[in-house]
Amino acid sequence: MDKKYAAENLLNELSSYHGAVIRQMKQMAELYIKLAELETKKESSCNKYRQLVKSGNDDLRQDSVMEQFFGLVNTFLQNHRDTWKRSLRIRTYKVVPFTSSAGVLEWVNGSVPLGEYLIGRMRSGGAHGRYGAGDCTFLKCR
């Protein structure tokens, strides 16, 4: 019980300085607890999923809506004979917003953050270095 009281006191003190972050963390923890308590089918209980927990200035509710829209586009692509034959689709991922600025995103294997793609790891070139503004190959010009 002493550890519980010490943790509560620490949390209360931190809340006075970082209240919004602490509230979001509490909310996230509560949601993860609810997720853990959900019943799963025995055959699917061994599946592992990587997740990205994100918080910041981006509104994850907008990300969630866009992913739903891309899912709808995929439905249209599957229902059209020509696009179905060519297996055209948009790769989507799951977004679960907890608040407007915090949530969990499904990890997409093989993905690279946009900043890393543009400037490279350790600022070693990336797309900006390979395809300069005057380089026509970036636009596939002739």
Image: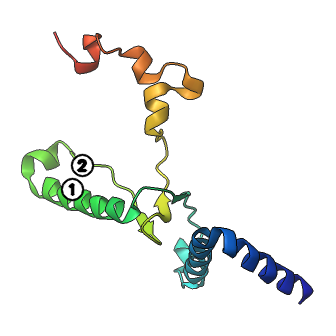
- Residue to which mark 2 is pinned: 89
Identify which residue is drawn at 17% across, 42% down.
Answer: 86
Identify which residue is drawn at 29% across, 11% down.
Answer: 135
Amino acid under disc 1: Asn
Give 15 or 33, whichever is nearer the viewer.
15
Task: Give the x, y percent position of residue 111.
Answer: 46, 41
Give 110 or 63, whichever is nearer the viewer.
63
Who comes first in sequence, dot 2 or dot 1? 1
Identify which residue is drawn at 59% across, 85% down.
Answer: 37
Amino acid under disc 2: Arg
Task: Give the x, y percent position of residue 68.
Answer: 27, 64
Give the colouring mode of the picture. rainbow
Q: Quadrant of the C terminus?
A: top left
Residue 66's disc number: none
User: In this rendering, is residue 16 above or below 141?
Assistant: below
Task: Give the x, y percent position of residue 9.
Answer: 80, 81
- Residue to which mark 1 is pinned: 74
Q: Quadrant of the N terminus?
A: bottom right
User: In this rendering, is residue 52 above or below 24?
Assistant: above
User: In this rendering, is residue 97 above or below 54?
Assistant: below
